[in-house]
Amino acid sequence: LGIERRLAIADLKLSTPLTLRLHRDEAAVFSDWQQQTWLLSALLLVATLLSTLVLRAWQRRKEIEARLIASYEGKRRDHQQALERSETYNRLVVSALNVGAVDIDMDSGQAQCDDAWMSLLGFAREGFSISLDSWLWLVHPDDASAARNLVATLRERESAAPIELRLRDSSDCWRWFT
């Protein structure tokens, strides 16, 4: 149903004549365009659905992460409060018993001591640091082997062991400790 016309253009040097086809059938002219339009529409719909699903999955993940973080923060806060209560209780007990405590890290040799222990030996906290070596230096020479045995036992078991020994105080006098 198309009309075929041959055109000859003087300035155009072609070995074969240029042929134009004109169609009067609208469906034939636009059939390729319609197929491409439907295909692009379908692809756009699929892309929209996929992006919606991905976005919803991402939002869901963020909601779950937020709930987990809130739960973790609540548990961490509860544990922190329990730890603070326990530390307060321990300080009150140590204070009421008028005893001192020394905590020595056997791996690093660093030690932490409370104010009561410092005052029992007559030392001021300023200018005095304690380590495993300085603690052993404070031990009476007759008690040094028992103190070294205690250190060896603590390195093996990581549990407290009883000992009675003498420690040098700030005035170079010996005081008994258990």
Image (cartoon, rainbow, N blue to C red):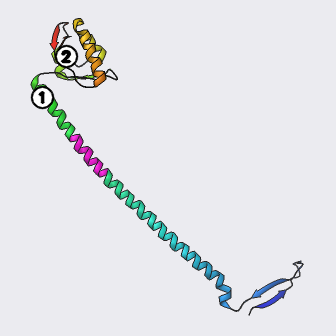
Magenta region: 69-81
Side (left or right) of 88 relative to 28 = left
- Residue pointed to by mark 1: 93
Residue 163 is labelled as: 2
Residue 142 quadrant: top left
Q: Nearer the viewer, residue 97 or 14?
A: 97
Q: Nearer the viewer, residue 151 or 27?
A: 151
Q: Residues within 10 Å of mark 1 (few under 14, many from 20)?
A: few
Quadrant (top left, top right, bottom left, bottom right) of the C terminus: top left
- Going by the image, does 17 lie left or right of 76? right
Q: What amino acid type should be assigned to the residue bearing mark 2?
A: Ile
The spot of residue 26 in percent (x, y) is: 66, 90
Q: Nearer the viewer, mark 2 or mark 1?
A: 2
Gap between marks 2 and 1, in whole Å? 21 Å
| Rendered view: 90 above or below 117 | below
**What amino acid type is highlighted by mark number 1?**
Val
Image coordinates for residue 120, horizontal then vertical, percent: 15, 16
